Amino acid sequence: MSKREDDCIFCRIAKGEIKSEKVLESNNFFAVLDIHPKSEGHTLIIPKKHFVTLLDIPNNLGQELLEFIKKVASNLMDQKRADGFNIVMNNLECAGQIVRHAHIHVIPRNEGDGIIGMV
Ligand code: AMP
Ligand code: ZN
């Protein structure tokens, strides 16, 4: 594996080298709780392979990814942690991407939670 991936925090979580709160897994993706949640249950959906942005994720993973996002979001709704949710993806530094391994935020929302800006 290349150095870049050895240094990548999400690759290290995928390999089990760094502890995380995994909530769900599919063939190519896993979901963990964000360590700095914007709301309770804030979850990150992360490809197991090292892709940097949405543009690097192969199209043939599209259906699996959509199903996985829907499953994470509907679990949050079913567990009554959310009345609604935001899906956010920051792509590259100028758009607020800090971890250079593609990931999608699922942010549970509730009436009057006062959360303003998602980036
Ligand atoms: P961004 O790259 O700005 O879209 O966001 C990166 C997100 O990863 C932030 O919300 C961090 O709180 C989160 N994060 C960073 N390290 C970890 C970790 N070890 N486990 C879970 N979430 C993390
Ligand atoms: Zn990575």
Image (spheres, helix red, strand yellow):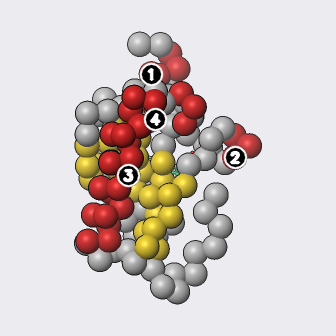
- The residue drawn where x is 58% and y is 75% is 115
Residue type at mark 3: give it: Ile
Which mark is first along the chain, 2 or 1?
1
Mark identifier at residue 9: 4
Q: CA distance from mark 2 to mark 4?
A: 19 Å
Q: With 73 as the anchor, is 91 left or right in this view?
A: right
Closer to the eye: label 3 or 4: 3
Name the amino acid type tagged 4.
Ile
Q: Residue furthest right?
A: 94
How far is disc 1 from disc 4 in space, using C-alphas?
8 Å
- Amino acid carrying label 2: it is Ala
> N-terminal of the two: label 3 or label 4?
4
Give the crowd class for mark 4: few <14, some 14-19, many >=20 residues within 10 Å.
Answer: some
Residue at 26% in and 33% down: 27
Count how many numbered circles sit on residues in the image: 4
- Badge nearest the viewer, 3 or 1: 3
Residue at x 48%, y 43% (from the top left corner): 103
Q: Report the amino acid beneath label 1.
A: Asp
Residues at marks 1 and 2, CA–CA distance in whole angstroms: 24 Å
Which quadrant of the rendered structure holds the C terminus? bottom right
Q: Earlier in the sequence, mark 3 or mark 2?
A: 3
For the residue carrying disc 3, how many other residues have a C-alpha within 10 Å: few (<14), some (14-19), or many (20+)?
many
Residue behind mark 2:
95
Looking at the picture, tell me which residue is in the foreground, 70 or 25. Answer: 70
What residue is pinned by disc 3? 69
Residue 79 is left or right of residue 29, and the answer is left
| Comes first in the chain, label 3 or label 1 | 1
